[in-house]
Amino acid sequence: MKVLVIGSGGREHAIVKQFKKASSVEQVFVAPGNDGMAQDATIVPIAQTSVEELITFAQQEAISLTFIGPEQPLTEGIVDAFEAAGLRVFGPRKNAAQIEGSKAFAKELMAKYSIPTAKYATFSDVAQAVAYIKEQGAPIVIKADGLAAGKGVVVAITEQEAIAAVEDMIGNQRFGDSSSRVVIEEFLDGEEFSFMSFVHAGQIYPMVIAQDHKRAYDGDKGPNTGGMGAYSPVPQIPQSVIDEALSTIVKPTVAAMDSEGTPFTGILYAGLILTENGPKVIEFNARFGDPEAQVVLQRMTSDLGEFLMALLDERPFDLQWSDEAVLGVVIAAEGYPTYVEKGHNLPDLTELESEFAVYHAGTKEVYGNYCGNGGRVLLVTAKGASLKEAQAMVYTGLDAYQWPKFFYRHDIGWRIVDQ
């Protein structure tokens, strides 16, 4: 097989690496990729939004399967375009990608089909939203309705914070059209976890679960980010809860999408929280989580290319996972998740890459050395017999280097390791 991966971040590097080690895959291309992926795939300098160019490339190269990584092209209909051109592609069509592209769509779907989630209301008027916040009280959660690169959620501890968030999103159009409407949710307390599944034609293949760390700094301090690290498995979430989430959330959601005429193919990401009343949905995504993909895919022992072809052909497949633990830490540029400076040199990664799995997200190669070219720059993972072992290994590796102009959290996995 020849495989094309579309996207340029750490998540796409994880997908690329998984295809690279699959014996069914002869060659992996990535568009547009980043410089750090060149060691694992052939870089194709076509933007993820240049759909016609991507289709032409896939046709000319006789690509067997295209895997769409990021949410933006999915919500804009890239899968529909590839299918119309007669190309095999893995990901949801535009109407199914709404489950991530519109939080209001997702909440309405859950309400209609009794899928457990937080109580909510939707607003496009600041005054009405403020009145609702005052009526409900805090803590309370404010979410931009549309895509906001993982930054459109504010967990407001006070009413003042919530009102400021609404004024910023709706009034100041903080995320453009994506925040012209907001969803305001009750605050749910409990242990969060990421439950992703491969889905096609009603078939559901659940993955092992992961937990990520959203806050920028140690001790879960600082602003929410796209994720500063992740680990899998999640020992504090028992198998009985995972089974319950599959039966009360994932399966009913896939069935609901079919019933609504928006059948789902691709990665259904359920961001869940274990409350005193069982697991509930915080959010759905229509693709792999980042950084969850980097730790979960490392635990897959099956051939990804062979599996996806079987899934799309609706043939049964015995998907296998390792019992090993994987823990990953994000290296971010100073200032992330707000303003960051690009162009600062990273240390020589040669030795690090020989000992650990290193995923490039925002790097650029300049005169033989990598420098930062984004907010989240790298993710480094270690694999061990236990999470504690994996954690010790990755931090020993990272702490051996100087990281001027970059930072990382020193406590990824604290919820389990410190217990």
Image (spheres, helix red, strand yellow):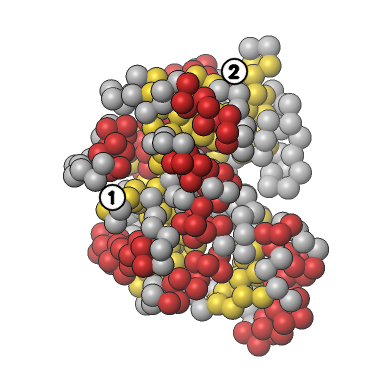
Taking the view exactly as shown, the residue that stands out farthest to the right is 172
| Residue 2, placed above or below residue 153 | above
Give the crowd class for mark 1: few <14, some 14-19, many >=20 residues within 10 Å: some
What residue is at 41 percent from the left and 23 percent from the top?
62
Q: Position of residue 54 (x, y in %)?
A: 54, 30
Quarter location, residue 356: top left
Q: Sequence-wise, which precedes: disc 1 or disc 2?
A: 1
Image quadrant in which the C terminus is located: bottom left
Q: Nearer the viewer, residue 290 or 392?
A: 290
The amino acid beneath tag 1 is Tyr
What residue is at 52 percent from the left and 25 percent from the top?
57
Q: Nearer the viewer, residue 271 or 71?
A: 71
What residue is at 51 percent from the left and 42 percent from the top?
81
| Residue 123, placed above or below residue 270 | below
Q: Secondary structure at mark 1?
A: strand
Label 1 vs label 2, nearer the camera: 1
Q: Position of residue 17 (x, y in %)?
A: 41, 28
The amino acid beneath tag 2 is Asp
Disc 1 and disc 2: Cα gap in Å?
39 Å
Left or right: 317 with respect to 242?
A: left
Q: Which residue is mark 1?
A: 205
Left or right: 249 with respect to 75?
A: left
Quarter location, residue 101: bottom right
Which numbered circle lies on residue 348?
Answer: 2
Which numbered circle lies on residue 303?
Answer: none
Q: Position of residue 22 (x, y in %)?
A: 31, 26
Quarter location, residue 3: top left
Q: Secondary structure at mark 2?
A: loop
Give the crowd class for mark 2: few <14, some 14-19, many >=20 residues within 10 Å: few
Image quadrant in which the N terminus is located: top left
Taking the view exactly as shown, the residue that stands out farthest to the bottom is 135
Q: Nearer the viewer, residue 393 or 30?
A: 30
